Image (cartoon, rainbow, N blue to C red):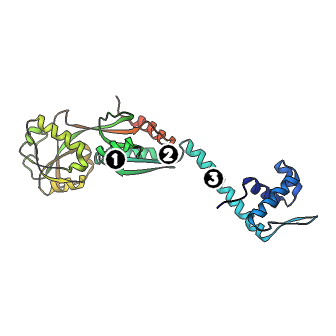
Amino acid sequence: MNFRFDLRHIKAFMAVAESLHFKKAADSLFITQPALSRLIKGLEEAVGVELLARTTRQVALTEAGRLFLAECREGLRVLERGVHLAQAASQGDIGHISIAYNDFSINGVLPDIIERFKEKFPTISIELTHMPSHEQHRALQDCSIDAGFMIGPLNMPGIETISCAVEGLLVVLPLRHPLAGRSSLSLKDLRDEKFILGADNSWKAFRSRFLKNCQQAGFSPNIVQEATTSTGIFGLVAANMGISVYTECVRKFTREDIHLIPLQGIEHQVETVAAWNSAFISPSFAHFIRHLQGEALPA
């Protein structure tokens, strides 16, 4: 709506409406009475109704003026709140952060990070989106997310990272598997097994690393089933369709139909990093970065 009046007119009207006296209103606004009269006349012309009933002795609100005054008061309250919110947002006290995550981070370190951040900054909203690591790389470059939690390490121009977790790998077995009684396993022990892995379109980063490890161990894994989710992987293993490998955060799952055995070798570890584009950091996200720095693993 194209208003032909501004905040000066509203403040002038409210001053007169609340004092019902032009001279007192003019003095409170530090303007002359003729200037105040011009502001009121201009407002009434813009609104198209008489807001104040004037006589030589008194000033009174018309019914239209009374209703208009109530809405002006509410409008000013909303405007003042808007100013407060804008100032708070500029300091990062309120705002919005968009975070992408992969399966390992949401099942591992990320929930605790988010929970502790929300305790410190309850007015900052967080949007969480599941996104495979390789897709997060593109999202960081075009700034469509503030941060990504993914498999590291990550070396990309303009992208900063913090290491949040380093987890060993576990072999996930059906309960009655012949290897279920072992205290630990190596990849060579698994060369003849049938594997269940995450689908390539959503587990690309992990698959490429695991396949490389298998090649270094002298074999290519026999992948017989794929799943798009962690739950799907565990369900297929429980159904005795094959075995899988997963990070140590799998211990948080309380399934009784699978067995977990550590996979030996320091190379069999997965790092989770938080990454962001340094080209744009909002005040709210700056708080999150400082929070991450406090949560980061020792160098």
Q: SS class of the residue under badge 1?
A: strand
User: Is residue 109 something that shows in the picture?
Assistant: no
Residue at 53% of width from left, 47% of height from top? 94
Residue 235 pos. (x, y %): 19, 56
Give the amino acid at mark 2: Phe
Residue beneath the point at 39% across and 51% down:
128
Q: Give the labeled residue for mark 3.
A: 81
Q: Which mark is residue 121?
A: 2
Q: Amino acid at mark 3?
A: Arg
State which tag comes first along the sequence, 1 or 3.
3
For marks 1 and 2, give the one nearer the viewer: 1
Q: SS of the residue at dot 2?
A: loop
- Quadrant position of the N terminus in the picture: bottom right
Circle 1: residue type: Tyr
In which quadrant will I find the C terminus? top left
Q: Residue furthest top?
A: 299
Which callout, 1 or 2, points at the residue further toward the start of the chain?
A: 1
How far across and down, in percent of the image, does residue 267 sit?
19, 33
Q: Position of residue 260 (x, y in %)?
A: 18, 46
- 137 or 274: nearer the viewer: 137
Q: Dots 1 and 2: beta carbons under 8 Å?
A: no
* Residue named by callout 1: 101
Which element carries disc 3, helix, strand or loop?
helix
- Cα–Cα gap, marks 1 and 2: 20 Å
Q: Position of residue 169 (x, y in %)?
A: 20, 41
